[in-house]
Amino acid sequence: MPQYWLMKSEPDAFSIHDLKQQGPSPWDGVRNYQARNFMKNMEVGDLVFFYHSSCKPAGIAGIAQVTRRAYPDYTSWDSSSPYYDPKSTKESPRWFMVDIELVKILPSIITLSRLKQDPALSDMTLVKKGSRLSVMPVLASEWQHILNTTHQA
DNA sequence: GCCAACGTTGGC
DNA sequence: GCCAACGTTGGC
């Protein structure tokens, strides 16, 4: 049984179309401990809602799957990278990433406002007020509900 | 562009 | 170890 997740990306920086073009891609740049810890719990084959944030409309743009378990985020060692963190070393890496690849692009965005309107999803971390996590778990029941009710399974 | 909510930093 | 100040996220 795969686990289910949701990962946010600003489409201007990296969109689901970029993921399609690039094939398996490292999910670099996560610099939040909670999000990092979730990535460390991912297994190959886990399924991911690919979420477009800071855009109109914000929402779930497609589905991806994990192709490589967590390994050190090498951008944390690159002093020319915006994700550089001098406290992360090769001996003791602080930040990790997984690789994901596209499963499918949804025919239309499942918007955040729509998710917020659904009483069955009121406990989702995503729709909670003030939630800023960029990587979060999704319950199997929520995953199925979202795909079933949007007729995009 | 605004700003609420949240995480992190650093002085004490 | 507290907590004020600061920076960031991300919807609106």
Image (cartoon, coloured by chain):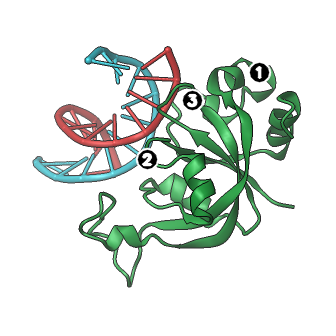
Chain colours: A green, B cyan, C red
Q: Give the left or right position of residue A105, taking residue A40 as reference.
A: right
Report crowding for label 2: few under 14, some 14 to 19, many 20 or more residues within 10 A (C-alpha): few
Mark 3 or 1: in front is 3
- Label 3 – label 2 distance at C-alpha: 14 Å
Amino acid found under the numbered disc labelled 1? Asp
> Which residue is pictured at 52% across the width and 43% down the height?
A133
- Tag shown at residue A33: none
The tag earlier along the polypeptide, 3 or 2, is 2
Viewer-side label of 2, 1: 2
Q: Give the structural element (helix, strand or loop) at label 2.
A: loop
**Same chain? Circles 3 and 2:** yes
Q: Are marks 3 and 1 in contact (CB under 8 Å)?
A: no
In screen coordinates, is A45 left or right of A153?
A: left
Q: Residue at x 41, y 56 (%)?
A: A31
Q: Residue A65: x, y in percent? A: 71, 59
Q: Amino acid at mark 3?
A: Ala
User: x, y percentage for residue A10?
Assistant: 48, 41
Q: Which mark is residue A118?
A: 1
Residue marked by disc 2? A13
Q: CA distance from mark 3 to mark 1?
A: 16 Å
Check residue A58 in the rendering and tell me which mark sits there, or answer none.
Answer: 3
Q: Residues within 10 Å of mark 1 (few under 14, many from 20)?
A: few
Task: Assess whether mark 1 and mark 2 are in contact (beta carbons under 8 angstroms).
Answer: no
Give the mark, 3 or 1, whose residue is nearer the N terminus.
3
